[in-house]
Amino acid sequence: MACSRVASPLCFLFVLTRYPLGRLSFFFNLLEPLFRLAQRLLGTQKVAWLFVAPNLAVFGVFTFLPIIINFFYAATAGVELMPANRPYSGLDNFETLLKCGDYTDLSTCNKDIFWRAVFNTLKFSLLQVGLMVVFAIITALVLNRKIIGRGFWRSVYFYPVLLSPVVVALIWKWLLQSQGAFNAGLVAMDMQPIEWLTVSDWAFFWTIFVSIWAHMGFYTLIILAGLQAIPKDLYEAAEMDRASPWRTLRRITLPLLMPNLIVVLVLAAIKAIQVFDEVFVLTGGGPGSATTFIVQFIYQTGFAEQIQLYGLAAAASLTLAAFLVILTLAQLRLSRADEMGKRER
């Protein structure tokens, strides 16, 4: 096939796949003088930066630059989007966000919806992370045993992780809505339908359930990898000593799983605090503010409300980022402490 029949990038790929590298050596010979010049000017070690520079540039534009812009918006006021039209306000946005007359009474806060979102997020994180870790440990213990169809069941539990959060939420919304499959089943059994998503307690319960269902497979896989790394000799010795299954779990399995459990706890906590996609599609933050979490508050304040308060949304996002940094530092501290403990033993 002639190169004139295809676009030049496709032609180049065609040549690369059709001819062996030996016949393309002249391409690399053309580049060799450039590399030698760069090596002479920069030094051997600094030449590597030429290869990572494009990636660093993209990373800087789409990661570091938005962070800097976020700090700017958090320190300015007004409803204008353009930076030139936003007056400097210092820490006023943080004061508006965090100030309360009585922290035990959310109605006395300047932004009571923010504090309700904080309370909902903490409640969601504690319940979701706690339950998911327990279920992930139990599931991993079962999947680590010699059961029929073990490979199939492992793939079944991991499959929801591969789905988009929006797809997960749409599936469960179809099941839970007023005219959904669950209520159709209740009506078929001569029972009253239940408003799963419009009653506060039920809506909060289903946000936790759907989140656990969607993400548990990933953490189960981490724990399962930890279980398979435990030497079997320890279990054989425990069996010879006639240790009960509970004692084996408490004295052998859980202590040796601790590094994996620390990773699971921190990653699950970070994921839970940032929850947005599934809940936004499933309940929209309702009923009322029953399932409104911090990230949704940031989205609504900065983008969805009729009056868009970019500074307040930026201040809330930085507050959330500070908490996530604390969690990350806690993970590093715990991991180092665990490694030092292993070395001492």
Image (cartoon, rainbow, N blue to C red):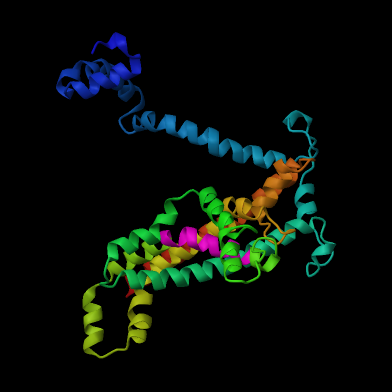
Residue in the image at 38% along x and 82% along y: 250
**Position of residue 318 measured from the top left corner of the image (x, y, whole percent):** 65, 49
**Position of residue 178 measured from the top left corner of the image (x, y, whole percent):** 65, 59
Res. 126 in view: no
Q: Is residue 58 above or below residue 206?
A: above
Left or right: 340 as drawn, with respect to 29:
right
Q: Magenta stretch?
A: 204-218
Left or right: 36 as drawn, with respect to 78:
left
**Position of residue 36 measured from the top left corner of the image (x, y, whole percent):** 28, 21
Left or right: 224 as drawn, with respect to 192:
left
Residue in the image at 66% along x and 55% along y: 294
Q: Quadrant of the C terminus?
A: bottom left
Q: Is residue 249 above or below residue 18?
A: below
**Position of residue 151 measured from the top left corner of the image (x, y, whole percent):** 28, 62
Q: Quadrant of the N terminus?
A: top left
Closer to the camera, 125 or 196? 196
Closer to the camera, 15 or 320? 15
Does residue 206 belong to the magenta stretch?
yes
In the picture as drawn, the residue positioned furthest to the top comes out as 4
User: Magenta region, mostly helix, strand or loop?
Assistant: helix
All told, the count of numbered labels is: 0
Does residue 3 belong to the magenta stretch?
no
